[in-house]
Every structure is written in structure tokens, then in C-alpha cells.
Amino acid sequence: MTSFWYSRPTLEALHFLAMARAYLRFRDPRRKRSGKHLDEFYDRIWREAADQLGATYHPLGHHIADITLGDIRVRTVENTSSIDDPVTIAIALNKLLSYRLLDESGLPTPPHLGFTLKSIDQAGTFLAAHAPCVVKPAGGTGGGRGITTGIRTPSHLARAAALAAVYNDELLIERQVAGDNYRLLYLDGVLLDAFVRKLPTVVGDGRSSIARLVEQANAERLAQGSGVSQVLLTVDLDMRRTLATQGFSLRSVPGAGTVVTLKTVVNENRGDDNTTVTESLCPAIVEAGAQAAQALHVRLAGIDIITRDPSVPLADSGGVIIEVNTTPNYYYHYHKRDGCFPVAVHVLEHLLRSAPNPIPTEVA
């Protein structure tokens, strides 16, 4: 693939535009309100876990808490605790390194390539052979930020790369694998909980544009706090690409009752979009998830899998492992269509029992 389809100044302009949009989203007061709802959620679940286990919960400020039981102390902040060490977390945050370790363990990952804005022609060659593709930051981010799906053309690639580079200089392009997104949660190799994550949607009323439906959905999320979703819907490149694959744009007015998929990146869905599948997963998939956690030496691991059929091994369905999370989000384990799984209780009990951290005694 030749480079005539973009110029360096054009790519830099796209990158600066993406940075400006990301900054405006960061400064959006509605998102700050939504973030406070998530902070309150984590404060609540750790406090409830401590109460259930007979421990004492003591907030230190900035959403950091001391949780003590006798002479044992555990500290938590949001979805982070001492259960995994900083080096393990750093390895998992490096998506290219994570993929290499998974590949070396014989686990399926999507065909992929690392690149930068300077080597985007290499990504263009990869795209020509593997479209549709996903472009994402290769590390240092989470929550779906900077990820764009449905990449089919050099123009899509340039815009997606410019966006991903806001979050990390190293970028990743991978073949987009068809199937549903599953999150499997392991603690020291034992599967605790698993659920299928459906994509975020809105339902047309025959009058409102999709942009207006997104505004209404975000207003509902703000009004109901963490009871609906952990985050607001973001109008970004992934939303535009996902709508385009259905023949829509943000200006489209879908008919009454028409379900419109907003994004292919799943992180901004609602709690009701997720359903427990712990007991229905193929044993080979459960084992593959445990092997993925072991490959990266992660104790508390959220393994993200794409598969068309969770009742058969990944090799039989063309399924893949797309991420190993060391600080997995607890939110959707508590907010699922079919009930709550109290992750904080299991993690805190494990820490208090198996990783004692005695409180230092004062020296007279």
C-alpha cells in the first residue's frame, strides 16, 4: 500500500483534533458527575464487603480506604488492591507484550501488528490483508478509550490511529473477530464469575435523531447514577463507524421500535446489557481463561474473550482472547440483568486470609 492517501501534516492535524476532542470530553461537567457516581459505587461495595466480613472500613480520602481485621490491614482504591504487584500490572497494560505471552502459551489471539503514526504504512498493509480491523492504543489505557472498530479503508485507519495516539504512542491494529464479548473473572486461577456483554443500543421512537437518543440516554444515566451504567455514552469514531455499518449516521431518525447498535466497543453498555454465563461456558474456554491469567501471572484477572459459540472450544468457533485485565472493573459484576456477584467480598476475604499485612506497632 502506498502512502499517497495521507500526508504527514494531515495525519498530525487529525491527531491534534483528536486531542482537542479528548480534552473537551475530559472537562465535560456531566462526565465528572458520572465519575463521582462510580467513585461512590466503589466506596459502597468496599464498605459493604468490610461489614460482611467483620472488618473495619476507614476512608483515608481520595477514595483510598484502610480495611482492618484484627492486626491485618488491606488498602483499596476503586478497583485496585494489593492483590497484584506493579510489574504484573505493567505487563498486562502492554497489549503487544500480553499478546506475545499468550501466543507463546498456545492461546488464540487475533492477528495483530504494532505500529506508530510514523509507521502507519505498515498498518495499511496489514489492513489490506485483514479488514475489517480494530485500532487501539497498545498500552496505558482502559475503559475502551481510543479504540475504534470497523476499520476498512486507509481513511478510517488514519482517523483511528490519530485518535488512539492520544492515549499512547505505541498503537495496535488487529483483525476484528466476529462474536460476542465475554468477561471471565478469575481469582488465583479459579473462575468466580462470567458474563456476556452485549453492545450499547438505543431504541428509535420515529421522531428523534440518533444524536438526540444518545442525549436522552445520557440524561437517564446521569439521573439514575450507577444504577444504570458506570459511564456516559461517548460520541466518538467507534460510534460513527458502528452506525455507518448499519446505514445510519447521528442525524438518522430510526423508526419506532428500531434497535440501533451504537458502538462495537462494549465498555459503555448498560448493566442490563450483561447476563451471567458462568455455568454455561465450555470447560475448554474456562481452562483457556485460567491459562491466560497464568501466562501473565495475574491473580485477579478479567479475561476478555470473543466467540460466536461459548459452548465449544475457542479453536472450534474461531474465538480469541483479546485482553487480560489486572484491575478488572467490578461494576458489571454487581449490575447484571440477572443479579449481583459481590466481587469485593471475595477479593477482600482472600486478601485478609492469604495475604496478611500486619499493622505496625508504635515504637515507644
Image (tube, rainbow, N blue to C red):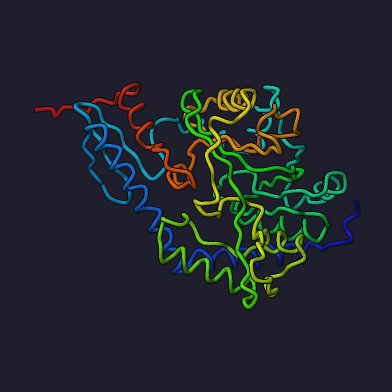
Number of numbered markers: 0
Image side of residue 240 versus residue 2, left or right = left
Q: Is residue 89 visible?
A: no
Does 58 sit left or right of 336 as displayed? left
Question: Where residue 228 sits in the image (x, y, percent)?
Answer: 46, 57
Q: In the rendered view, would you say 11 is above or below 183?
A: below
Q: Is residue 260 above or below residue 103?
A: below
**Does residue 52 appear in this view?**
yes
At horizontal 71% and vertical 53% (from top left) the residue drawn is: 149
- Residue 235 lies, in percent from the top left, at 61, 65
Q: Nearer the viewer, residue 354 or 349?
A: 349
x then y, percent, for residue 13: 71, 67
Residue visible at 28% across and 50% down in the picture: 61
Residue at (44, 69) in percent of width and height? 29
Against 298, residue 3 (above or below) is below
Quadrant hosting residue 5:
bottom right
Q: Residue at x 65, y 71 (%)?
A: 256
Return the residue nearer the eye: 317 or 238: 317
